[in-house]
Image (cartoon, helix red, strand yellow):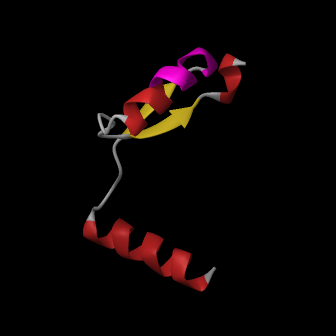
Amino acid sequence: MKETGEMAEFCAKAGVCSNIVKITGGQINQAWRDVVAKRARYRFVIDPKSF
């Protein structure tokens, strides 16, 4: 989408980036519990190699 591209370009120019936590497939349930309990402070990214 055009808007997504514009936002990515803006973030690159402004130095804005997201903080991520890479998790394994076995950590999905705990990550979800953290999200529901509002303890998640990062974006969870599941490592597909962990399956």
Query: Bounds of the magenta span?
Result: 25-30
Residue 38 part of the magenta segment? no
| Percent of width and height locating residue 38 | 31, 39
What residue is drawn where x is 47% and y is 37%?
Answer: 44
Is residue 28 depicted above or below 6 in this figure? above
Residue at the extreme bottom of the image, as rendered = 2
Q: In the drawing, does residue 41 fall left or right of residue 36?
A: left
- Is 11 or 44 nearer to us in this picture? 44
Is residue 41 depicted above or below 7 in this figure? above
- Name which quarter of the figure residue 37 lies in: top left
What residue is drawn where x is 54% and y is 23%?
Answer: 29
Q: In the drawing, does residue 18 fall left or right of residue 44?
A: left
| Percent of width and height locating residue 11 | 35, 68
What residue is drawn where x is 51% and y is 24%?
Answer: 23
What residue is drawn where x is 34% and y is 43%?
Answer: 19
Q: Quadrant of the N terminus?
A: bottom right
| Percent of width and height locating residue 13 | 32, 72
Q: Quadrant of the C terminus?
A: top right
- Is 12 or 51 nearer to us in this picture? 51
Is residue 14 depicted above or below 50 in this figure? below
Q: Main secondary structure of the magenta part?
A: helix
